[in-house]
Image (spheres, rainbow, N blue to C red):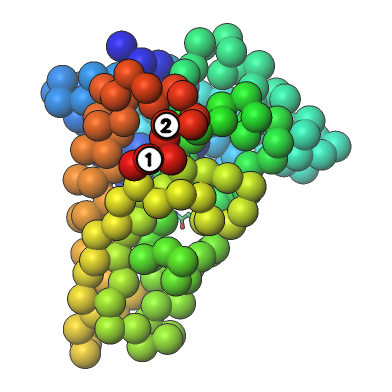
Amino acid sequence: MKKIAVFASGSGSNFQAILDVVRTGELAADISLLVCDKPGALAIDRARADRVPSFVFQAKDYLSKEEYEKAILAELKRYDVEFIVLAGYMRLLGPTLLTAYQGRIINIHPSLLPAFPGKDAIGKALAAKAKWSGVTIHFVDEGMDTGPIIVQERVKLEAKETRESLQRKIQRIEHKLYPEILQMLLTQGDVIDDKKTRAY
Ligand code: GAR
């Protein structure tokens, strides 16, 4: 069973969705570690409730991104983590993690990339009066939500769409799609080979 780490910064509802399908046996993975950069985040409580170890840090306690990513990397090695799942982790990854886990890091983003990258994609879609938005799952590179896309699913914005209603629709998709794609990637033996991941 592949050992995965989930990185989160906030509520961790996607982390919870992944935990739930692991518990039911629908997803064959071992969630070995939660990495969280926000002490007090709800994601940490979710990990504790499910007995998943967590590594919690604050970037300001380190001299640089390289320093805190080295600390994360040491934890990932300690738990033999093979695959990284970003689930609302609101930081760009640097070369320390990208090199160590090349082709083995995925992210979920609440828009149809390349539209509305970065923070508050839902607010940006509403402000732009977009007719469609959605969810993107992609491999992670050094850019802001720019890596090769694995899958996208659309949602239509209604005339009376609010932030709450759009967020609800998007999260419903995220919580179903992320575990499904994870299952697909983890059961493909060649996912570890970063040359082949580009073919998805
Ligand atoms: C999710 O909607 C995810 O797509 C988004 O953060 C939310 C985290 O929610 N990620 C990004 O915007 C990444 N650029 P959660 O903590 O409840 O899973």
Amino acid type, callout 1: Ala
Label 2: few (<14), some (14–19) or many (≥20) C-alpha neighbours in 10 Å: few
Q: Are marks 2 and 1 in contact (CB under 8 Å)?
A: yes
Give the labeled residue for mark 2: 196
* Amino acid type indicated by mark 2: Lys
181 or 172: nearer the viewer: 181
Residue at x-position 45% and y-position 77%:
124
Which structural element holds mark 2? helix
- For image coordinates 77% across by 34% down, the residue present is 66
Kindly identify the residue that appears in the image at 51 percent across and 11 percent down: 79
Along the line of sight, the residue nearer the viewer: 158 or 37: 158
- Relative horizontal placement of residue 18, taking residue 114 as reference (left or right): left
Q: Nearer the viewer, residue 40 or 64?
A: 64
34 up-or-down from 165: above or below: above
Mark 1 burial class by Cα count in 10 Å: few <14, some 14-19, many 20+: few
Quarter where residue 109 is shown? bottom left
In the rendering, at what x and y percent does residue 25 appear?
A: 15, 20
Query: How far, Cα to Cα, is label 2 from label 1?
Result: 6 Å
Query: Residue 134: horizontal and vertical position, in percent?
Result: 30, 65
Residue at (21, 25) in percent of width and height: 27
In the depicted structure, whether residue 10 falls above or below residue 29: below
Where does residue 30 sit, x and y in percent of width and height?
33, 16
Front in this rendered view, residue 70 or 12: 70
Residue 28 visible at all: yes
Tell me, for residue 199, which label it has, or none: 1
